[in-house]
Image (tube, grey):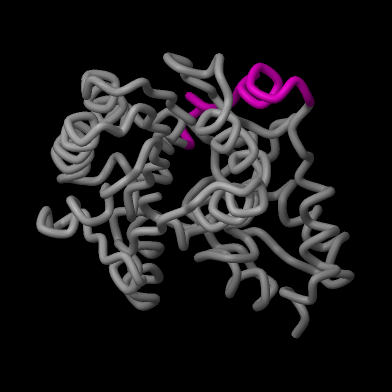
Amino acid sequence: MVGGTGKTGRRVADRLTALGYGVRVGSRSGAVPFDWHDEGTWEGALEGVSAAYLTYYPDLAFPGAVEAVGAFSRLAAERGVGRLVLLSGRGEEAAEAGEKAVMESGAAWTVVRCAWFNQNFSESFFLEPVLAGELALPVGGAVEPFVDAEDIADVAVAALTEAGHAGEVYELTGPRLLSFSDVAVELSAATGREVRFEAVSEESYRGVLEAAGLPADFAELFSVILDGRNASLGDGVRRALGREPRDFADYAREAAASGVWNV
């Protein structure tokens, strides 16, 4: 499993372990060294692997991702990995080239194409703004069908372990469209304190990202995928699992109960 310590990867690893599967987690600092930028780490990560979950950091749409994911997928197929499940981004045209590279690798493949994660507000770069009570983002009134990482993990595990998912592109979203103002309302209700939303310029947000040690290009990604192209619901969770996706309000209540937003 590549990226097995990330938001979706660790959930996939936990589920597979609970089901009794042997799991090898490859990461730059883990017991199994893996680095997308160091092909010398790839062979060891693939040893004895029959199926793999692939996630590319920081995002499949970033420069270099297509080449790395394509080369790794071809190597995986050559080494006998029969099934590849790729995490991709919904509405990211650049990421589709990475999907195509996996599709052409020679292994059976499934693409898990996802909307923005709910967990970005509790486990990632939106956590500190939520704690501060203000989401200042370059998004205006754009709406997004935020998807839960628990749903993503369930779909990925099904694709890795069950028949019937090969050759499928699953577009995973939540059950409704939310603006970031709507998200702030949901977070306020879940936390019991005010969380505000403020629209800011892309330029100013790049500075915020750089100060936080995050790729400044994430600011551009906001404007690209939140231009209306993703303002629709996908049926991937239903098709893959036969159930409805988890709602943002349910996620927010559970996250608040965990204490992650306590200040």
Q: Position of residue 56 (x, y in %)?
A: 32, 48
In the rendered view, tell whether residue 254 sits above or below residue 142.
below
Q: Is residue 240 left or right of residue 54?
A: right
- Residue at 54% over, 24% down: 171
Tell me the quadrant of the picture where the C terminus can be found.
bottom right
Residue at the far bottom in the pictured view: 263
Answer whether residue 128 is magenta in the image. Answer: no
**Residue 231 falls in image quadrant:** top right
Is 238 colored magenta in this rendering? Answer: yes
Q: In this picture, which residue range is highlighted in magenta?
A: 226-243
Residue 21 against residue 108 in the figure, above or below: below
The quadrant holding residue 126 is bottom right
Q: Nearer the viewer, residue 119 or 31?
A: 31
Asked which quadrant contains residue 247, the reply is top right
Name the residue located 66 percent from the left edge and 44 percent from the top edge: 148
- Residue 210 locus on image (x, y percent): 32, 71
> What x and y, as percent, mark residue 234?
62, 21
Q: Using the image, determine if residue 58 lies above or below residue 247.
A: below
How many numbered discs?
0
Q: Nearer the viewer, residue 38 or 238?
A: 38
Q: Residue at x 50, y 65 (%)?
A: 125
- Residue lying at 36% horizontally and 54% vertically, measured from the top left: 218
Q: State whether the magenta stretch is mostly helix, strand or loop.
A: loop
Q: Is residue 152 left or right of residue 56?
A: right
Closest to the observer, 251 or 23: 23
- Give x and y (percent) for residue 59: 34, 47
Q: Is residue 102 left or right of residue 89?
A: left
Residue 226, compared with residue 107, is above or below; it is below
In the image, taking residue 28 as reference, residue 158 lies left or right, namely right
